[in-house]
Image (spheres, rainbow, N blue to C red):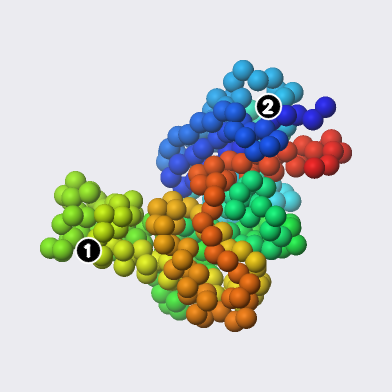
Amino acid sequence: MQAPYAIGIDVGGTRMAAGLVDRKGRMVAEARRMTPKSGPFAVVDAVVDLAEEVCDGYRAAEVAGIGVGLPAQVDFVRQSVEFATNLPLTGVDVRSLVASKAKQSVTLDNDVHMAALGEMRFGAASGIRDFVMVTVGTGVGGAMFIGGKPYRGFRGLGGELGHMVVELDGRPCPCGGVGHLEPYVARPAIAAAGQEYAATYKGTHLAGLAGGDPAEVTAENVLAAARDGDAACKRILAHSAHTLGRALVGVVNLLNPQLIVIGGGVAEGDPIFPDTVQGVISDEALAGRNDVKVVLALLGNDAGVLGSAALAFDEYDSRENLHR
């Protein structure tokens, strides 16, 4: 008998979400919380707590397993966390720790790989075999599907679009490199530009959204001011989208995808973000520009949860010699 449910958990640099998901991609229970900042074991405990919360009232035999998406480079074969920029998880045996406490089979993958799988199974990339997904939030993540299958690279460490170099000797990146895409387009970059603007006379409205203190302006404040019509905040977001588009020109030329799906809190908060990216690709890419369409993710914050659950189902079915 097939287990009818799986647990999907999406661990972000800022927030965590979990869901008990059925095989049609419907969440029958869900839970959310802020990501702990007190260390790696607090993150592990939060993952276990979320898993227990969403499966409360269900028998263990009804659950195929737990899929966990992490904002990290995950060696998919070894199921080890090789490097994490925004959370202190590098070298932590997350899989074993969660499995021992939750008493369920656990499979790890990069969080954007999970979100892309969710969009392919249930969302914007349904029926698409060659696509790229990029998320713009606390950081910038990426995932690639080629021929209908996720391309993770030799050990599962591929897809790190946020760490492509976009400016030689440029801004420092949280990963330790310089000139990478992430420090130009993610939340911290938008917040920093907003803080600089809010300190000027014309930025009074933006400063007001942060309680009157320009130093407290967040990316969400910039998004809100842009929606209110603030021209400077619109330009800040347009610059972020344009920079992302320039980076994705190289991806289009390299991979010739049919679709680019853009997700994450920043992109989803700015309705013209995908159009700006599409425009840059149309202007600057080679012939592949005629094939690719840029769209906003359909599943929003649920993409990572649904993709993580889908991976848990896939791993369970493989162990049980079942087929999708």
Amino acid on which the number 2 mark rests in the picture: Lys
50 sits left or right of 238 in the view: right
The residue singled out by tag 2 in the image is 103
Q: Which mark is residue 197?
A: 1
Give x and y (percent) for residue 270. Answer: 39, 57
Identify the residue shown where x is 61% and y is 25%: 55
Identify the residue shown where x is 71% and y is 60%: 129
Most distant residue in the top direction: 57
Q: Secondary structure at mark 2?
A: loop
Residue 247 visible to an observer of this rendering: no
Q: Is residue 53 above or below residue 25?
A: above
Give x and y (percent) for residue 175. Answer: 48, 61
Q: Quadrant of residue 253?
A: bottom right
Identify the residue shown where x is 22% and y is 49%: 209
Q: Residues within 10 Å of mark 1 (few under 14, many from 20)?
A: many
Amino acid on which the number 1 mark rests in the picture: Tyr
286 sits left or right of 136 in the view: right
Q: Is residue 324 or residue 18 the one in the foreground? A: 324
Q: Residues within 10 Å of mark 2 (few under 14, many from 20)?
A: some
Identify the residue shown where x is 56% and y is 59%: 261
